Image (cartoon, rainbow, N blue to C red):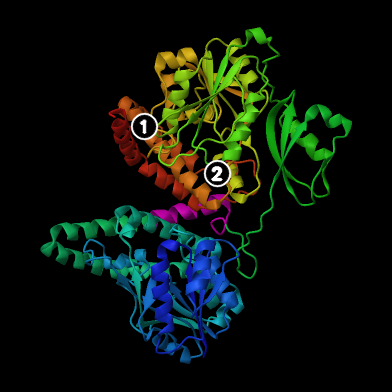
């Protein structure tokens, strides 16, 4: 019986642990046939592993990023009859493989799970209940005796026959851990799938096959504990949707009925010796169980409402995840040209977002799919008909002398020099009679290099702002601006040539308006992460109709008003009258990108203006196109950051005006309903595909918002005291 050992690694941070894991496999009393190290999308780690890990076979995961995809890559390369799995932050006892494969002498045993002991960074933490050691990827109190049949082994220490994968395919990628995202359940789903097809075979537990799993300090926090429990509930919902709730949750029900009562008694004994630790154990049990159940119910509800069976993954009959992706074309279609037999070439089967344009303004977006080498004229006419009632803004063509001088403020930390230069060039080419462009360099002074060469233009001014954060940078721009209104955008956008003219005309035609937010559309949908942004948020703005609102004049049917001010615009496309800024002040420096609060500064400004009696307007003719985050990791980071910013914004609102707390609390049920509304209502996309964990990331960010705001306020005060 040849044994292939698969170890998956993704981070240089675990390099030392990885070398120990590999060495422990090579020094087994029963030598493995091969040790395969799979590097998950990390070129630096791959190069280092190839150079140093001479006793192992190093390969890469070329499919979907994550633990499941990496394991599948190892399985594909393995030549052994049995494939054993060990985590990169664990190490095995000398007799691990010998004990792990011993039960496989029985031909009916399809796989074996070993015993996983936590390797703590210090003393054993008394406050963590042993029934929840699965949070750390370890064996836990309540598992059956040695040799007993189990539903599935734990992925950090298991061995499966090669025929298991040959029969039902690999691990389902969307159920596995991706980087530090603590979703799981992929081995559970795989084993259930195999047992369903081979009911006479089973999996067993071998307690003498021991590995030691390192538990870093970062996991010994309450935040990690409850988020991991929530994520486990979500994962179980996904597994249950694939394999059925009865078989998927049998072990969990037994654990709740038997192991938890024993843990309660044990915690009571701990209270007698260490009251604080004992109480903490009981609290952890209550919170952990509640979060896991809540995560499961949330996941089940979301799956039922969306009709999505796999938490965002599409599987082929072999059980493998499909990660095929093709960019989506963005096509502007002037309705005036339809009668001329407009022809738009595409590729057969390509998804297309048709941007319907009337009188030079985009009035709606519709998704279609081309069946031939061009978008059919009937599809274009259908799109035009769909938005026939959306009237373009009645701005007309105002004479230049009626347009006030404008200042355009662009904060930057110059992450992409080419993008910054492109934005400046586009701004200087705007169709507007009198304006200036102010670039605010918001980088720290340490090791700062010069900005890239910008156009030599008298209308361009570059200033510096040492205080970190986009709010401080915008306020610096306001301080030096000379325009009668000030427009704000970012350094990762493309502005329409008529953007500033639309803003100036709206200010000129409506003297009551103090603030204008403009339309923000994607500049490209070249990656799936960029599509996810549009699907999850519905883009930055979801209206194509010009509107205005104040406290005295608003839609009484809007149950969230005035706490949904984000519908009026985004920080990358907004403008304020100079008089409004002089009267009510600039942006809150405790909020925004570049601060611990990570966002919310634009929302706080909108809200302050509304509560002060100002009129806010939305002007779809003022168009900006935004380059969304291109990678999945960047998207998830952005989702969490947006959640943090939203939570910080609400806390700041109450901190400045405690009377808002009661009014906000009455709108919480409506807000929750909208937050969890079906995915098909969030986007024009006909097949929403963003992962279910996206909502979890947003909720985690929202929950952290209050803490982030307090930190941000303290840091802002330190800078102001200098």
Magenta span main SS: helix
| Residue at (43% x, 88% y) in the render | 103
Extreme residue in the left direction: 272
Q: Say if 106 sits above or below 577 in the image.
A: below
Which quarter of the figure has residue 681? top right
Instruction: Write the residue at 68% across / 16% down.
Output: 394
Q: Residue furthest top?
A: 401
Location of mark 1 (residue): 590
From the top left corner, tell me how far across and down residue 76 is, in percent: 60, 75
Can you give x and y, in whole percent of width and height, for residue 342 in the image?
Answer: 85, 35
Asked whether the residues under the numbered discs 2 and 1 touch, taking CB atoms below 8 Å apart as contact, a structural biologist would say no
Q: Which residues are magenta?
A: 293-312
Q: Note whether 86 is above or below 583 in the view shown.
A: below
Residue 581 horizontal side relative to residue 590, left or right: right
Mark number displayed over residue 536 = 2
Q: Is residue 140 magenta?
A: no
The secondary structure type at the circle numbered 2 is helix
Task: Please indicate, yes or no, whether residue 487 appears anywhere in the rendered image.
Answer: yes
């Amino acid at each position: 019986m040849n044994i292939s050992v698969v170890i998956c690694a993704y981070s240089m941070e675990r390099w030392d642990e990885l070398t120990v894991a590999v060495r422990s496999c090579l020094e087994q009393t029963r030598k493995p046939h091969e040790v395969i190290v799979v590097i998950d999308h990390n070129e630096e780690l791959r190069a280092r592993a190839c150079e140093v890990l001479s006793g192992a076979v190093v390969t890469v995961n070329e499919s979907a990023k994550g633990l499941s995809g990496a394991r599948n890559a190892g399985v594909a390369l393995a030549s052994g009859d049995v494939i054993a799995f060990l985590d990169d932050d664990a190490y095995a006892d000398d007799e691990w493989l010998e004990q792990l494969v011993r039960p496989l002498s029985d031909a009916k045993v399809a796989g074996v799970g070993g015993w996983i002991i936590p390797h703590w960074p210090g003393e054993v933490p008394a406050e963590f209940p042993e029934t929840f050691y699965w949070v750390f990827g370890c064996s836990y109190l309540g598992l059956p005796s040695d040799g007993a049949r189990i539903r599935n082994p734990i992925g950090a220490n298991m061995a499966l026959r090669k025929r298991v994968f040959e029969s039902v395919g690999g691990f389902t990628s969307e159920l596995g851990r991706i980087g530090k995202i603590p979703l799981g359940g992929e081995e559970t789903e795989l084993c259930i799938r195999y047992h369903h097809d081979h009911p006479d075979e089973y999996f067993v537990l071998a307690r003498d096959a021991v590995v030691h799993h390192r538990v870093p300090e970062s996991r010994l926090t309450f935040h990690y504990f409850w988020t991991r429990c929530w994520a486990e509930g979500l994962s179980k919902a996904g597994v249950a949707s694939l394999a059925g709730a009865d078989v998927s949750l049998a072990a969990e029900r037994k654990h709740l009925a038997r192991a938890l009562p024993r843990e309660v008694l044990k915690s009571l004994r701990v209270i007698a010796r260490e009251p604080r630790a004992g109480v903490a154990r009981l609290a952890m049990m209550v919170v952990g169980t509640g979060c896991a159940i809540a995560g499961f119910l949330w996941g089940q509800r979301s799956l039922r409402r969306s009709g999505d069976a796999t938490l965002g993954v599409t599987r082929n009959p072999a059980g493998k995840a499909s990660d095929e992706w093709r960019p989506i074309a963005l096509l502007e279609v002037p309705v005036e040209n339809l009668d001329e037999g407009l022809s738009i070439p595409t590729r057969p089967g390509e998804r297309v977002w048709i941007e319907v344009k009337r009188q030079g303004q985009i009035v709606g977006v519709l998704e279609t799919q081309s069946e031939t080498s061009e978008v059919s004229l009937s599809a274009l006419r259908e799109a035009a008909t769909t938005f026939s009632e959306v009237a373009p803004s009645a701005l007309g063509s105002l004479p230049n002398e009626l347009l006030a001088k404008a200042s355009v403020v662009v904060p930057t930390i110059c992450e992409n020099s080419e993008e910054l230069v492109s934005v400046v060039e586009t701004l200087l080419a705007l169709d507007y009679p009198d304006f200036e462009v102010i670039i605010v360099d918001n980088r720290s002074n340490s090791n700062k290099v010069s900005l890239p060469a910008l156009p030599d233009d008298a209308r361009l001014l570059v200033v510096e702002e040492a205080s970190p954060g986009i709010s401080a940078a915008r306020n610096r721009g306001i301080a030096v601006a000379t325009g009668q209104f000030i427009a704000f955008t970012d350094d990762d956008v493309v502005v329409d040539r008529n953007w500033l003219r639309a803003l100036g005309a709206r200010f000129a035609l409506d003297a009551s308006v103090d603030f204008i937010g403009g339309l923000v559309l994607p500049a490209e949908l070249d990656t799936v992460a960029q599509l996810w942004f549009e699907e999850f948020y519905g883009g930055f703005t979801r209206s194509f109709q010009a509107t205005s609102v104040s406290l005295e004049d608003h839609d009484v049917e809007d149950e969230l008003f005035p706490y949904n001010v984000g519908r009026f615009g985004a920080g990358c496309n907004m403008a304020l009258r100079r008089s409004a800024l002089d009267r009510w002040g600039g942006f809150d420096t405790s909020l925004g990108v570049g601060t611990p609060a990570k966002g919310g500064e634009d929302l706080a400004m909108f809200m302050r203006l509304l509560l002060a009696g100002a009129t806010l307007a939305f002007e779809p003719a003022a168009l900006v196109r935004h380059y969304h985050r291109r990678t999945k990791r960047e998207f998830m980071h952005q989702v969490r950051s947006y959640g943090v910013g939203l939570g910080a914004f609400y806390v700041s609102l109450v901190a400045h005006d405690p009377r808002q707390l009661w009014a906000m609390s009455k709108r919480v049920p409506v807000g929750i309903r909208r937050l969890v509304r079906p995915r098909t209502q969030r986007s024009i996309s006909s097949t929403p595909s963003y992962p279910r964990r996206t909502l979890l990331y947003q909720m985690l960010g929202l929950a952290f918002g209050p803490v982030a705001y307090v930190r941000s306020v303290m840091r802002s005060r330190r800078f102001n005291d200098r």
